[in-house]
Amino acid sequence: MKIKISADLLDGLVLALLERKDYYGYALTQDMQAVIEISESTMYPVLRRLQKNNYLTTYDQPFQGRNRRYYRIAPAGTQHLEQIRKMWVNYKVSLDNILLGEAKGKHYG
Amino acid sequence: MDRDRYLDELKACLQGLTVAEVKDAVAFYAEYLSDAQLEQRAAIEEKLGTPRQLARKIMADYSIRDDEHTTGSKVKSAHANSRMIWLIILALLSAPFALGAVGVGGGVLIAVIFLILAFFMVGAGLLLAILLLTAFFLYSGVVLLFQEFNVGIFYLGCGMACLGLLLLIVPCLFWFGRVLIQAVANFARYLYRKFNERRRAD
């Protein structure tokens, strides 16, 4: 079972991956799918939204006679990612308190 | 080749977007399919759905987000709202799996839309009736004025009253129709967001 993920977290995950390195569409989808359940047709709207908000920029690079579009995190994207991180930490701590409050010392995962 | 044909069909299904938007979307999926090394139609559709399903999802996403971006508020023209409602219904209908609660919501949405259509029919009928009545009274009034002055004046007065009623009712109907469409649009948008959360998880 995997927990459903909100649009904010989805943005955060994409930006966090892009913070490590530039990605092209397919590789990004693969790396996202490694951690969360996400359909193939979900990435395009997410990337387009992030680009529209100036959180990322794109550039093309030739690959085997065709173009690959790479996505690079922009300064505004880094800031946005920091906000999402803060939100996430708060969220995680308060949820842990409730979900795992009685279960300290046990091991999960 | 299956891949090219798939992309051509996708392109043909993408309507209401600018040339640049269509190009961008098709380029994204062309690159995706090349990188994923998907060649066979069945394999492509397993990942992305049919071209029509994918196109509907892209169009619905555009229509919703542009909605939020350009206006900032939730009020939009009745025309744009109708278009968005329609695109969302298409996207929901083309979903390849059972939708549970969202499916019920979609059913409600469609029912509400038929209700609104009925409302417009009734409104149009009402308007037409009053219009005919007005025409009848005014015509009779003018004709009778030269034969029976009193009766003619009475008919003319009735005609004027109907005309006044018409002027009162038309803006009311118009306003009410807009409010209804706006409400349905907001509901459709809400539904689509729920639907997307679900799909992301599925």
Image (cartoon, rainbow, N blue to C red):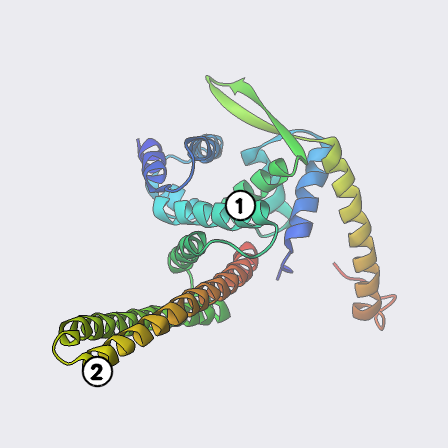
Of residues A16 and A33, the one nearer the viewer is A16
Instruction: Judge whether B92 appears above or below B116 on screen.
Output: above
User: What amino acid is labelled 2 in the image?
Assistant: Asn
Residue for point 33% across, 41% down: B41
Q: Whole-percent x and y of residue B91?
A: 42, 55
Q: Can you say which quadrant of the picture contains the C terminus of chain A?
A: bottom right
- Residue under circle 1? B66
Residue for point 45% across, 45% down: B58
User: What amino acid is labelled 1 in the image?
Assistant: Asp
Badge 1: residue crowd in 10 Å (few <14, some 14–19, many ≥20) = few
Q: Whole-percent x and y of residue B159?
A: 27, 74
Q: Is residue B57 visible?
A: yes
Q: Is residue A29 visible?
A: no
- Residue under circle 2? B150
Of residues A13 and B168, the one nearer the viewer is B168
In the current view of this chain or complex, which residue is farthest to the right? A105
Disc with the residue nearer the chain's start (1 vs 2)? 1
Disc 2 element: helix
Badge 2: residue crowd in 10 Å (few <14, some 14–19, many ≥20) = few
Q: Can you say which quadrant of the picture contains the N terminus of chain A?
A: bottom right
* Subunit that carries the residue with mark 1: B
Residue for point 44% across, 54% down: B84
Residue for point 18% across, 73% down: B136
Of residues B106 and B33, the one nearer the viewer is B106
Of residues A106 and A1, the one nearer the viewer is A1
Q: CA distance from mark 1 to mark 2?
A: 61 Å
